[in-house]
Amino acid sequence: MAFPHDNMEYRRLGNTGARVSVLGFGSWVTFDGQFDVDTAVACMEAARDAGCNFFDNAESYAAGRSEAMMGRALRELGWPRWSYVVTTKFYWGIHSGYPGMENTLNRKYLSQAIDGSLERFGLDFVDVVYCHRPDPDTPIEETVWAMSDMVSQGKALYWGTSEWTAQQIRAAIEVADRHHLHKPVTEQTQYNLLEREKVEQDLAPLHADTGYGNTTWSPLAGGLLTGKYRDGIPEGSRATLAGYDWFAERTSDKDLIARIERLRPIAERLGCTMAQLALAWCTKHPMVSSVITGASSPEQVNANFAALDVVDALTDDVLAEIDAAMATSTG
């Protein structure tokens, strides 16, 4: 497939010169949890055929097996290394019970975590490495130095944050500026029609001041925004997976499901699915560098990336209609 893809928009990764597809593809939940490497290859190939160049992962996904699966898929696909962006995230750790090696951003953990990830991926470097959560028990100076060293050593090209507050990100940038280190360039925050406050309020001034990017996750709120939970929990859906009892409980919130159902007539009028409407909506925010999608089959990948056909239909009037539909009260 030739790049750039005609139907894909490529945005700057924060204030860097790197360009990422506005729709990305991530491995959370599905890789190792829901399918094997053959399906991973098929899904990644479908995403790339749609113009995707951004592939997201994390050390903690399936305790490292997700990185290994994506690495194997990349070898089977044989794409040139310059043609895609691959990311990972550190914080939770995969060595449960070992002091200082889980739920942390200390130098020892970070320095060894990147080496483990690169080995599992079978790569010389990752394009972006994120601090998966903030760590109040490690001095911010220690974390910033360790992340900057990763970049200086060529093990990562950029580093960023995930689910940090604007205040915490500003503190990291200040440390990096003071010591002439590599600064974080992008956040990875949950952002969807049900979770808006973090991006639209807390992080907005930071973006305006610094151009800080955001590769957002959970654009479909775990599948809630697809409308498939209207009549209960479908067999094989995320709500049926082990460890997702909290999500299953959310699907039984009748008021929430009713709010989501107000999107259905809007989607039908635009000739798209509710999922495509929700994905297209996420891309409209100027702070968003890439929206990370997930899928359990190549057919689902194709359906998700068809959301690109809906973006131009989301005029200001339609966006206002969506806001009104999602309001907690119809007034």
Image: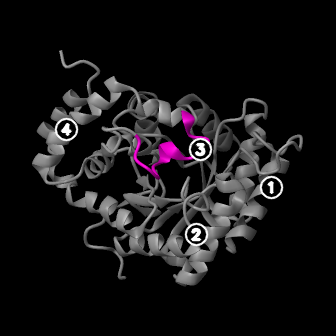
Q: Earlier in the sequence, mark 2 or mark 4?
A: 2
Are circles 1 and 4 on residues that touch, CB within 8 Å? no
The residue wearing badge 4 is: 319
Residue 51 vertical placement versus 268 (above, below): below
**Type of amino acid under label 1:** Ser
Q: CA distance from mark 2 to mark 4?
A: 38 Å
Are circles 3 and 1 on residues that touch, CB within 8 Å? no
The residue wearing badge 2 is: 36
Does residue 86 belong to the magenta stretch? Answer: no
Q: Earlier in the sequence, mark 1 or mark 4?
A: 1
Magenta stretch: give its range: 233-245
Which of pointers 1 and 4 indicates the residue nearer the eye?
A: 4
User: What is the magenta segment's predominant secondary structure?
Assistant: loop
Does residue 236 belong to the magenta stretch? Answer: yes
The residue wearing badge 1 is: 111
Q: In the image as oriented, which residue stretches furthest toward the top? A: 331
**Type of amino acid under label 2:** Asp
Q: CA distance from mark 2 to mark 1?
A: 29 Å
> Which disc, if any, is residue 15?
none
Which is more toward the observer, 189 or 138? Answer: 189
